[in-house]
Amino acid sequence: IATKETDIWALGVTAMEIITGELPYASANPPGQIVADVISGKLPYKRAQGMDERLWRICAQCWSPIPSARPRMFEVVRELQGM
């Protein structure tokens, strides 16, 4: 079900895909491992080498396994503007 919280999760993934050029869970092998990774709370990406810590923190917060704990869009925008 699409919600504001799933949109935030997708925003974090989209940002990392732009930064790394990789799909989320790219190292999952076989591809069925992705489901297990998501269920276990494994993040879809690792921090990219040289990536700004603040940007990494924003992305990681977007992937909170508890949807209500994910930042709201205005919070993401505020953090990005502060960078």
Image (cartoon, rainbow, N blue to C red):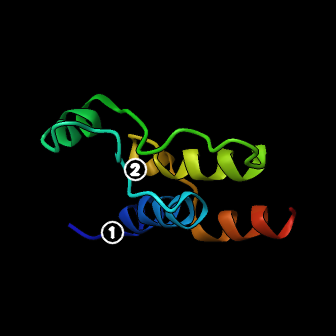
Give the quadrant of the C terminus: bottom right
Residue 12 higher or lower than 56, as above or below: below
Q: Do residues under tags 2 and 1 come within 8 Å of each other at their CB atoms?
A: yes
Residue under numbered circle 1: 3
Q: Which one is nearer the viewer's eye here, 65 or 50?
A: 50
Under circle 2, the secondary element is: helix
Residue under numbered circle 2: 67
Q: Quadrant of residue 5?
A: bottom left
**Which residue occupies the extreme right position in the image?**
82
Under circle 1, the secondary element is: loop
Pick whichever of labels 2 and 1 is earlier in the sequence: 1
Q: Quadrant of residue 7?
A: bottom left
- Label of residue 82 in the image: none
Local packing at callout 2 (Cα closer than 10 Å; few below 14, some 14-19, many 20+) is: some
**Which residue occupies the extreme left position in the image?**
32
Q: Amino acid at mark 2?
A: Pro
Local packing at callout 1 (Cα closer than 10 Å; few below 14, some 14-19, many 20+) is: few
Q: Position of residue 51 (x, y in %)?
A: 73, 48
Q: CA distance from mark 2 to mark 1?
A: 9 Å
Residue 70 higher or lower than 40, as above or below: below
